[in-house]
Image (tube, coloured by chain):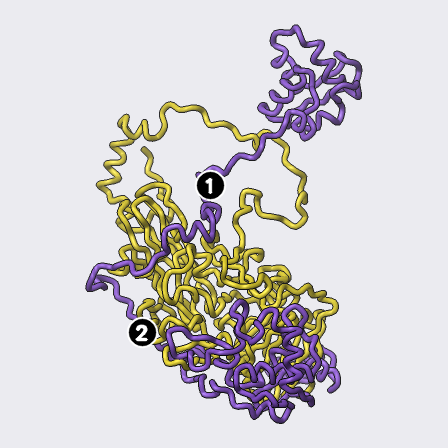
Chain colours: A purple, B yellow
Amino acid sequence: MCSSRLLALGLWLIAASASAAPAWEALGKPLAANEIASWDIDVRPDGVGLPPGHGSVEEGQVVYDTHCASCHGTFGESTDYLALAGGVGSLGTATPQRTVGSKLDYATTLWDYINRAMPFNRSKALSVNEVYAVTAYVLNLNDILPADAVLDERSLPQVEMPNRKGFTQAHGMMRADGKPDVRNTACMKDCLKTPPQVSSALPAGFTHQLYGELGPHFRQFMVAAPAAAAPTPAALAASNGCLACHAAQQTRVGPAFADVARRYAAVADAPAQLRQKVRAGGSGVWGSALMPPQTTVTDAALDQILGWILAGAAAP
Amino acid sequence: MQEKTPPRGRLRTEPSLAAPPGRRLFLRQLAGSAVLGAAAGAAADPLPVPDSAKQLGKPVASSPYGQPARFEANIIRRQSPGLTRTNESSIAFTPLQNLFGIITPNGLHFERDHAGLPDIDPVQHRLAVHGLVAQPKLFSMDDILRLPSVSRLHFIECGANSGMEWGNVAVPTVQFTHGMLSCAEYTGVLLSTVLDAVGVDLKRARYLLAEGADGASLTRTIPLSMALDDALLVYGQNGEMLRPENGYPLRLVVPGVQGVSSVKWLRRLEVGDAPWHTREETLHYSDLMPDGISRQFTWIQEAKSVITSPSAGMTLLDKGGYYEITGLAWSGRGRIKRVDVSTDGGRSWHTARLQEPVLSKALTRFRHDWVWDGTPALLQSRCVDDTGYVQPLLRQLREVRGTRSIYHNNAIQTWQVAADGGVHNVQL
């Protein structure tokens, strides 16, 4: 019996392994080379991915003036968006300027970014040759290429960028088990030699000027928000369903509000009587139509509606 | 007075809350006296029964896709004035000061777009996977939804979160100091599953390029080790499909790694043997050191915490008394092990309570009881993750990295509580 169980288990295992290829591996449609090519636009520092083409600094100036200068400035100097030129040698100073010329380590990155993401409002609108040309022009604005330079898929990866050696991967933040560069200790008592001093705070008026009133940024129920405009009695009559059967001046299923006002004009406790009639409902006073009991209208709303009716139900 | 079992929260022995026996006796004596009787409200106007209790409400499904209460209209993402030049390549911050627990509501998840918010039809959307693979493939959303799925809670934090504060205090509330941070339950497919389905060439493959379907076609290099570990192809966020702002219909989530790597509107993955040095990993998202050298591929978000309440911009309504200090802690290297809270600017620290669940590479909620004595206070939180790493002081970070690196500021945050109850962002 024991052996037959083992045999059964063995047969099951064989069956399971026979169908081991999970069906989900088959999901997805095989991609043909030309399909990949239509999307595969990325370019690496070694030039892999650059399409054949060429463009000169001179041609690039035309492209630049047409598509780029309005944001980046005539000479790539505008810091309104992102300065393209200048700042070489500034990265180690107190006022580093991050530009194409000062920060990029490879010219291929500039080509790749223009090709995929520029112009900002109409990306991928430039032809391959236009991208080569405007890349050449921006490098010329940075004094990296001479004015008569022409770039193509072979020369672009050869361009030596000023910040070629400006990056390091020798740090602890590439891996989850990397070594941190700063070491604090979890002191619990008497941790400060001197009393804490505030070294930086926002200048007076700064927050209000830039961000306005901060009150709404917080949920404090006890601070009352400005009350919304109170609805008119006519609106309350509508929202509570009164106007389904009544109108101000015309008799419908029920009496006109103006007729109610006339009948109760001389009645001392008219509001109380009417409130009771509305709450209880009934028929026979104005005809045979039944007024259903009105239970959902609030006391406050009902008092307002009745006051309005008894005053003649004037249009708001 | 009948002694009932106190609620669980009162059983703790912290002197600030649990009344010692002597004090309980005192309270009982007080209860019989006129003093406490008056305090309990002897004669006052009757409480009004609210209108809502006397009315028929709206029908069900009045709002077929539910909306927050109308009184919550101010609980919104916000841009920081003057931070970006356009509203398309910009950032909207999560209002951390308004949120509870660890889950960011989908409508409040922070939003960082590089070329505006695209409108993508999932029927048309495709993911291409190619490069060093046995069989390049194109996946429809139907294909992806049929693949074996997982759900994981993770935070996403922009590498530039708190970046405005490297040199000095620059922004007024926790929404702007720390609000490029959100946490959700993401549902999707392990990236390793998809790489299996295309037969990734494990001998040669070292990196992936992830590319978005937005106008920027944003690209980031992802190391294969992370891709095969816990990176996710995500379509679900907190039980529903991703919101457009967060990558509808498909995004990458690389847990523990700076947000820009979690490419939104994902449409292409290329497997390669070398990094690409794209614009978003050279010109930007690289950390400039004082010597002018930039650290590249600073992927990991190191352990960090912040108190979300009380926090800057709030005003404490009672000048003194009990306030719960609560906040968030997270680490891109694993779980949060401990959070300590100081109310005296770091002179002394007290270990806070951690709210379960405490998950790897997810936000963890901490809480600490505080009875404010009404005098100025300096509130701080400091977390320790399960590698033993202790969240650093801003001074310690500056000593190594200077003040111009923009990215990866995970310093201890200080909120100053003034005697008038106002809470302010300060640095010590």
Report the residue marked by disc 2.
B399
Q: What residue type is labelled 2?
A: Glu
Quarter holding the C terminus of chain B is bottom left
- Look at the picture and state if B169 lies above or below A135: above
Does the image show residue B114? yes
Q: Residues within 10 Å of mark 1 (few under 14, many from 20)?
A: few
Q: Mark 1 lies on which chain?
A: A
| Residue drawn at (52%, 58%) of the image | B79
User: In this rendering, would A63 be left or right of B83?
Assistant: right
Q: Image quarter for residue A48?
A: bottom right
Q: Image quarter for residue B148?
A: bottom right
Q: Nearer the viewer, residue B95 or B91?
A: B91
Residue B170: give x, y in percent of width and height: 40, 60
- Look at the picture and state if A128 lies above or below A297: below
Residue A287: give x, y in percent of width and height: 79, 14
Alpha carbon separation for disc pair 1 and 2: 43 Å
Q: Which of B375 and A26 is in front in this view?
A: B375
Q: What residue type is labelled 1?
A: Phe
Q: Nearer the viewer, mark 1 or mark 2?
A: 2
Residue A298: give x, y in percent of width and height: 60, 26
- Look at the picture and state if B325 lies above or below B201: above
- Disc 1 with disc 2 on a shared chain: no
Quarter holding the N terminus of chain B is top left
Report the residue marked by disc 1.
A221
Q: Which chain carries label 2?
A: B
Residue B427: give x, y in percent of width and height: 33, 60
Secondary element type, mark 1: loop
Secondary element type, mark 2: helix
| Residue drawn at (53%, 71%) of the image | A78
